[in-house]
Amino acid sequence: MLSAPLPTRFDLPPEITGQLQNVPLECVHWPLYSSAAYDAAVIPRQVQLFNYLRGQTVSGAGTGATSASRWHTNMEAVQTIPAPKTFLVCGIRVMVSPLAVTTTTALADDTVGTAVAALDQVDDLLKFFHTLCLRFKIGDSIYVEAPIWMMPQNNGIGGVASTSVHSNAAATLQTRVALHTRGVAYDFGDSPSARRPILWNQQSFTCELLAEFATNPTLTDNKLVRVTLDGIMGREIQ
Amino acid sequence: MVEVKAVPFATLFDDSIWRTAIRKPLYSSVGFSNAAIPGEVSFFGYARGALVPGAGNAAGVVSKVAHTNMELAGSLPLPKKFRCNGISVHMLPAAFGSSDVPSASDPTSNTATQDSDLIEDLLLLTYSTVLTVKVGNKEYADHPLDLFPSNTGFAGLCTVANDNASGTNVGTMDVVLPHTIGNGISYRVYPFLIENGQSFSATLRCFFASPPSLNDARLVTVVLHGSMYREVQ
């Protein structure tokens, strides 16, 4: 145990530290995440997340029935937090994988360097962010209902790159991209008076991705979309 | 770890040892070969002077300062303690033959077959694996690797060279310097402690039955950021 009180950016409500239920909990930054698989097809109107566990089928139509691993989700119970854990939701971010995802991962622009060069990754990311909205509910209360472009990933690959041109007529232009979204985070605590949502143990919550246009866009590759609830997990001290 | 008495430059703890704390990241590297990403590789399980683990070190290279600063395999020597407030993972922008020979990562530039080995490998590694960090039996991270960006690398601008003196190589490039950036999982508000003698580990895992393959041999380093408490001398 550390002797000095740990510095905190904010006062934790008693239910997240376990004081309220008289179970002392330790706090750790432990984002909850869940993924949805999308086929290279029309974006479906609704996909649920956080509704499966590791070993169960990943949500969505992508690649048929994919068994979930740690890479897809870290949920321990379907749409809830097992007792005595609690979870303070600090923010939401949405990641669209820059790779094509089937039963494994692969580069998203395999036509690069050939006579037909496409920009699958850019195309698909644009389609997702022009189309999808996210709804997050705890119990019956809606906490988030907004387009996903308001929930940037703020994680990815940056650096320096340039393109090359070659005289080989069959491979005139080479590109490799590594896209991610960035911007003002969807932060539940960015207002002094705002209260961060709390997932009590065994409180149900739902999260779904919506695409409610009359004609939704068609994806170029099979893709994985991951929603991350960024926050503080209160877990039992052992 | 209970502080008993503090003076400006040191603190007396309840085990009667005066310690000072300095910023000192703990880091450990593993060599990857230009083959399928392995199902599991472990970091911090060797001390400097031992062989760099991983298939990328088929030649059996002994680890140096560039690879790790661990003094013991898998734990801290008495009386040191470490308070961790962050984790980052680095794939250096170079190919690493035998985990010991850094070289340019895109040697096919300026040839008929040009590619982008570096950014391809960084994409495949970052978005295909999960990092687990444990102290004892307790996990403090068990999340996809993109949540642990390195936030260290190159930035700037590049141009494309047009070599009009060469009939076969009209445009060339050898600059692709990506790195992972962003807001990762932070332990600054709730840091975790690694006591001396307490085992700890970091494990990188790829759960796919048919994992993607890297183009080049790589050196991947996991860094635990934080404060090292060491005895006053």
Image (cartoon, coloured by chain):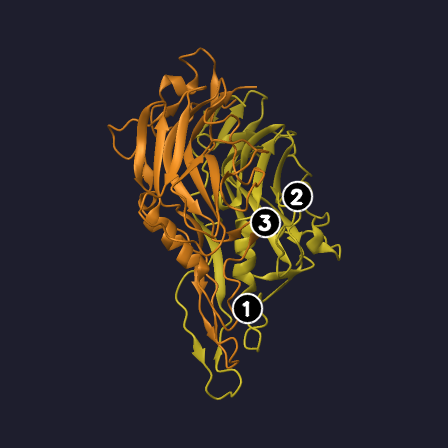
Chain colours: A orange, B yellow
Task: Establish whether labels 2 and 1 are both on one chain.
Answer: yes
Whichever of callouts 2 and 1 sits on the residue coming sooner in the sequence is: 2
Residue for badge 1: B115
Question: Residue A97: where, in percent of width, then height?
Answer: 47, 49
Residue for badge 2: B40
The C terminus of chain A, quarter of image: top right
* Residue B106 in view of the camera: yes
Check the residue under mark 2 and report the chain it is in: B
Q: Nearer the viewer, residue B189 or B228?
A: B189
Residue lying at the far front of the rendered structure: A214
Task: Establish whether labels 3 and 2 are both on one chain.
Answer: no
Residue at 47% x, 13% y is A23
Compared with A90, A38 (above or below) is: below
The amino acid type, in three-letter code, at marker 2 is: Glu
Q: Secondary structure at mark 1?
A: loop
User: Looking at the image, do the residues carrying marks 2 and 1 touch, with CB atoms under 8 Å apart?
Assistant: no
Q: Secondary structure at mark 3?
A: loop
Question: Residue B187: where, in percent of width, then height?
Answer: 46, 34
Question: Residue B148: where, in percent of width, then height?
Answer: 49, 44
Residue lying at the far top of the rendered structure: A22
Drawn side of residue A2 relative to residue A206, left or right: right
Q: Residues within 10 Å of mark 2 (few under 14, many from 20)?
A: some
Q: Nearer the viewer, residue A133 or B38?
A: A133
Check the residue under mark 3 and report the chain it is in: A
Residue for badge 3: A104
Residue B140 found in image quarter: top right
Q: Which mark is residue A84?
A: none
Label 3 to label 1: alpha-carbon separation: 22 Å
Q: Secondary structure at mark 2?
A: strand
